[in-house]
């Protein structure tokens, strides 16, 4: 029990570490631009090295856990990450900063995958879905704590470096905890030495259901990111509200999302996750259509708040159910699902910016609706494929009995 508790803390810290860096970008752009003597636009572009590194790290994780244990993977990833964190705080050269950000992003992306692998190998079925959603709470909590720390340090006249350096605390805590825990055996070498060897199949995971879950997760994060990017501007143009009022769409969404995630993590312990997923994806479709057709600002804000509450569980529940598609699947399956979502988050700004430039802000909200509708249709398709191919009803009855 103590071992499992430490592993869960490490998994949560992996998610918090990632959020600690990513969620501060908007706050750090201006002070860092002043420090390096560049424009805010150029500084914002430099942060693309961090997001590109995150995508690269997630891709590397597809193969990393075949070669290295979870413990060694964390050491390989996080020791260079700490060094790069120190370099970012000390260097006056913006090109060195960009390189360090890229390496830091690799560590964050692959480290987040390691946290997901720990959960997938420690918990089964309903418990796995619940734990994945709790990690999203950790991500959201970090997104509240660290921007708050940075805002405070800047307000009292301290350097931006203090807020950035504070984000390294999660990484340090993980490295300190590593000697006290025995992780699940995931690498091929560990499996060969295990008394009860689990045979992983690296070919059978590439099946239609897995790709449907990958598509589902990609479309979900496209819809969410388009809403977060263009929602405030759409409200200003459509309903002539102030910038302060329009920003409510973001705070209301994430505030409701945290509450929804906590409740969802409890509910899926009682209700089969697939049936709960049908409810969540159908609510997402209904609410995004309401947002697209909203006749007033208040209706839009109410629909957005409910969207955060009812659908924030979709991403992690999709990973949890998707990781069950293949019995004794290797860590590569979980990493592929994370990579699919990361790709969606990465392409959303570029795709939506092109559409808005070509057409209008109104179309961005249509894109949000289409994304959530695609998520619903993809899940309904894969759900019935599961019933026909593996008899998902038997799985859920067994999970409920367990």
Image (tube, rainbow, N blue to C red):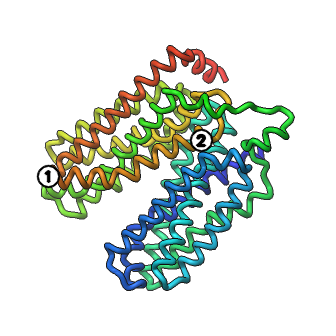
Query: Left of 141 or right of it: where is 371?
Result: left
Query: Left of 80 or right of it: where is 308?
Result: left
Looking at this rendering, what residue extends furthest in the front direction?
A: 203
**Circles 1 and 2: CB atoms closer than 8 Å:** no
Residue 235 place in picture, x, y as percent: 19, 54
- Mark 1 / mark 2, whichever is N-terminal: 2
In the picture, the quarter occupied by the N terminus is: top right
> 10 Å neighbourhood of mark 2: few (<14), some, or many (≥20)?
many
Residue 286 place in picture, x, y as percent: 28, 33
Q: Residue at x 40, y 39 (%)?
A: 311
Give SS at disc 1.
Answer: helix
Whether residue 72 is situated above or below residue 370 in the rendered picture: below
- Name the residue that disc number 1 marks: 238
Residue 362 place in picture, x, y as percent: 17, 47
Q: Residue at x 14, y 53 (%)?
A: 239
Q: Residue at x 17, y 58 (%)?
A: 236
Q: Nearer the viewer, residue 283 or 332?
A: 332
Residue 44 place in picture, x, y as percent: 37, 70
Query: Left of 292 or right of it: where is 4?
Result: right
Q: Nearer the viewer, residue 57 or 176?
A: 57
Whether residue 262 is situated above or below residue 390 in the rendered picture: below
Give SS at disc 2.
Answer: helix
Whether residue 267 is situated above or below residue 387 in the rendered picture: below
Q: Nearer the viewer, residue 25 or 62?
A: 62
Q: Which mark is residue 381?
A: none
Q: Residue at x 50, y 14 (%)?
A: 388
Q: How many numbered marks are there?
A: 2
Whether residue 22 is situated above or below residue 290 in the rendered picture: below
Q: CA distance from mark 1 to mark 2?
A: 39 Å
> 10 Å neighbourhood of mark 1: few (<14), some, or many (≥20)?
some
In the picture, the quarter occupied by the C terminus is: top right
- Name the residue that disc number 2 marks: 131
């Amino acid at each position: 029990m103590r071992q499992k508790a430490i592993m869960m803390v490490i998994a949560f810290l992996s998610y918090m570490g990632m959020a600690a860096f990513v969620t501060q970008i908007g706050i750090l752009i201006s002070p860092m631009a002043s420090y390096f003597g560049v424009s805010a636009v150029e500084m914002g572009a430099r942060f693309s090295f961090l997001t590109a590194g995150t995508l690269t790290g997630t891709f590397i994780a597809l193969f990393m856990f075949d070669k290295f244990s979870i413990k060694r993977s964390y050491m390989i990833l996080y020791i260079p990450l700490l060094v790069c964190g120190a370099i970012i705080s000390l260097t006056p050269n913006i090109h060195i900063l960009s390189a360090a950000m890229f390496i830091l992003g690799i560590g964050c992306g692959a480290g987040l995958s390691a946290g997901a692998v720990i959960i997938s190998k420690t918990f089964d079925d309903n418990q796995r879905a619940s734990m994945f959603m709790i990690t999203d709470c950790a991500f959201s909590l970090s997104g509240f704590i660290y921007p708050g720390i940075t805002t405070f340090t800047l307000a009292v006249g301290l350097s931006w470096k203090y807020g950035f350096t504070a984000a390294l605390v999660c990484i340090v805590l993980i490295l300190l905890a590593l000697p006290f825990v025995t992780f699940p055996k995931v690498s091929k070498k560990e499996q060969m030495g295990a008394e009860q060897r689990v045979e992983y199949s690296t070919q059978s995971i590439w099946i239609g259901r897995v790709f449907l879950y990958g598509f589902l997760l990609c479309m979900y994060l496209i819809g969410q990111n388009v809403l977060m990017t263009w929602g405030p501007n759409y409200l200003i143009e459509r309903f002539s509200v102030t910038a302060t009022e329009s920003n409510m769409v973001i705070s209301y969404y994430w505030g409701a999302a945290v509450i929804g995630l906590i409740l969802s993590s409890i509910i899926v312990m009682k209700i089969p996750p697939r049936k709960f997923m049908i409810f969540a994806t159908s609510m997402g479709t209904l609410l995004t259509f309401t947002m697209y057709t909203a006749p007033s600002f208040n209706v839009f804000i109410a629909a957005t708040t409910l969207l955060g509450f009812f659908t924030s569980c979709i991403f992690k529940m999709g990973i949890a159910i998707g990781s069950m598609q293949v019995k004794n699947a290797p860590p590569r399956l979980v990493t592929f699902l994370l990579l699919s979502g990361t790709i969606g988050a990465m392409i959303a700004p570029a795709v939506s910016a092109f559409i808005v430039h070509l057409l209008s802000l109104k179309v961005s909200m249509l894109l949000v609706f289409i994304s959530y509708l695609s998520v619903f249709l993809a899940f309904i398709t894969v759900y019935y494929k599961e019933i026909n191919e593996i008899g998902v009803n038997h799985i859920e009855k067994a999970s409920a009995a367990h």
